[in-house]
Image (cartoon, rainbow, N blue to C red):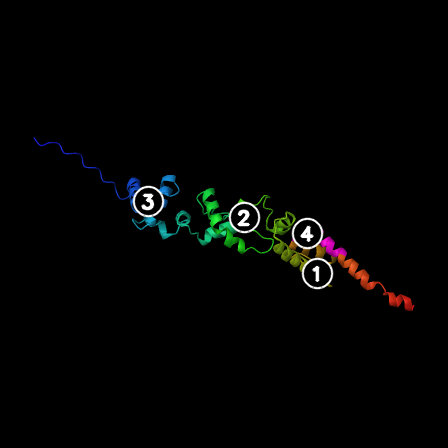
Amino acid sequence: MAEDSAPTPRRQHGHSRAYILDRLRRENRTDLAAAVEAGVVSAFSAAVSLGWTKRPPAVGGSDTHQARKRRHRFQALDGSLSAGQLMELQYGPNPSAGSLFGSREELERAWRRSRERLMEGCRPGRRVMGWWEFEATIPYPGRDLERGVLWRSNVLGAEEKAELEAWWRQEFAKAHAPDFFVHTGDEVLHGDAAIEAHLRWADCPRELARRWKKAERRRRARQQAPSAEVVAAK
């Protein structure tokens, strides 16, 4: 009677989690293997992203939100960010679709990688939402009040602060020009009401506006005062 042979190891199926994890390690894709083990992505999704298998077509052939989120996760694992993810770091998550990142940790890693280029695009007195989320020590006040809050919080650099104040000074002068008016959509404002509305739109700090108004009054007083020569001649 022949001796019993040793049992043949069971071959893992090509779509099984164990098989995919083993292949990821053999092909030195430890980044994806770690993501699968951590539950960030599924083993099947990892296999699809590498072309090892194909995902069944979506109903109606549509590109679902879940499919887009899977792509964004893989882009984050590969060190790249999609246009949608960059927009989220700049403006915040889409109110209806939600975040394109799988976790807050993933979001923070993406912010660290892209911080420099996103901050370079900020206009004076503006910050992207990634900065407000991870670096600000004050709550986000909303876009309409952002410039004034940042100015008062002393977080602006000297050059940025000077540029912002110069812009506010231009808007202050514009609002005090003769015949200046503001059309709100419902009515046309003139005089002090128009000035107030325009400076509120520009988010110009009241303390700056008061300083400039006092300086303007002193300038006009000097212009209207008679010179010493004229007084002596009389």
- Label 4 sits on a secondary structure element that is loop
Q: Position of residue 159 (x, y in %)?
A: 62, 56
Q: Which contiguous range is marked in magenta?
A: 203-214
Query: Number of callouts in the render?
Result: 4
In screen coordinates, is 173 left or right of 36? right
Which quadrant is home to the C terminus? Answer: bottom right
Q: CA distance from mark 1 to mark 4?
A: 14 Å
Residue 152 drawn above or below residue 162: above
In screen coordinates, is 116 left or right of 43? right
Amino acid type, label 3? Phe
| Labelled disc at residue 79 | none
Mark 2: few/some/many CA within 10 Å (<14, 14-19, 20+):
some
Q: Position of residue 146 (x, y in %)?
A: 61, 50
Residue beneath disc 1: 173
Residue beneath disc 3: 44
Q: Residue furthest left?
A: 1
* Mark sitting earlier along the chain (1/3): 3
Q: CA distance from mark 4 to mark 2?
A: 22 Å
Q: Quadrant of residue 10?
A: top left
Residue beneath disc 2: 131
**Front disc: 4 or 2:** 2
